[in-house]
Amino acid sequence: MKMKKYIFNMLTFFGGILTGMFCTMRFAETELKKERQNVNNISQISSKHFELFMLMNQWVKVKQKGENIGDYLERRGYNRIAIYGMSYVGDSLVRELKKSNVQVLYGIDQKADTQGIDIDVVTIEDTLKMVDAIVVTAVTYYDEIKKALGKKVDFPIISLRDILYDI
């Protein structure tokens, strides 16, 4: 009887250890997955902000040369445009184009209720009015945006990055 109790206690003891080890490993695995996802998210955000920094740096270089985006668009016959991406870059583009003959008819953004923008802002799901071109300021996602817009419109879709490096 003592031997059975001893074996039972040993099995219970080792079973507890194995259960604890298994639970610890599963917890560590879950935490590792979360940590990898956090690192991936931080990396994506970092890349996006670096691209935006490089875009704005190029914009400063264009301004230092005495050039501007409005003249570039006018030379190509883009006198009435829409702007996709109404965050900081889109707002800056609206302000720059106010000093030109290029009309910004509306903005397009996932958040159509964007505050502080003094033009109409719609979502990509809305009906998009005819313009000479759409300038995309969300350069990180340009390919996806161009593909989505291309399904809705048949006028040119241009990246602001391409404009700035072409000036």
Image (spheres, rainbow, N blue to C red):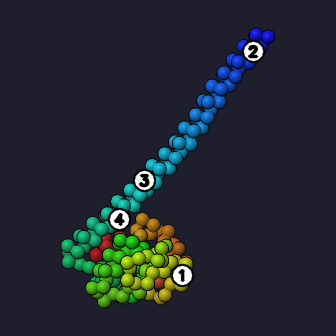
Q: Gap between marks 1 and 2, in whole Å?
A: 75 Å
* x, y percent for residue 37: 50, 50
Nearer-the-camera pick, 117 or 141:
117
Q: Which residue is mark 4?
A: 52
Q: Which residue is mark 3?
A: 42
Sooner in the amino-acid sequence: mark 4 or mark 3: 3
Q: Which residue is mark 2?
A: 5
Q: In what quadrant of the picture does the N terminus appear?
A: top right
Task: Report the amino acid beneath label 2.
Answer: Lys
Q: Gap between marks 2 and 3, in whole Å?
A: 55 Å
* Displayed quadrant of residue 7: top right
Left or right of residue 135: residue 110:
right
Question: SS of the residue at dot 2?
Answer: helix
Sooner in the amino-acid sequence: mark 1 or mark 4: 4
Task: Report the amino acid beneath label 3.
Answer: Ile
Q: Are marks 3 and 1 in contact (CB under 8 Å)?
A: no
* x, y percent for residue 148: 53, 74
Q: Are marks 1 and 4 in contact (CB under 8 Å)?
A: no
* Displayed quadrant of residue 70: bottom left
Q: Gap between marks 4 and 3, in whole Å?
A: 15 Å
Question: SS of the residue at dot 1?
Answer: loop
Left or right of residue 26: residue 164:
left
Rendered residue at 43%/84% (across/down):
120
Question: SS of the residue at dot 3?
Answer: helix
Please state which of the two labelled residues, at mark 4 or mark 3, is closer to the viewer.
3
Please state which of the two labelled residues, at mark 1 or mark 2, is closer to the viewer.
2
Please state which of the two labelled residues, at mark 2 or mark 3, is closer to the viewer.
2
Q: Are marks 1 and 2 in contact (CB under 8 Å)?
A: no
Sooner in the amino-acid sequence: mark 2 or mark 3: 2
Q: Gap between marks 3 and 1, in whole Å?
A: 32 Å
Please state which of the two labelled residues, at mark 2 or mark 4, is closer to the viewer.
2
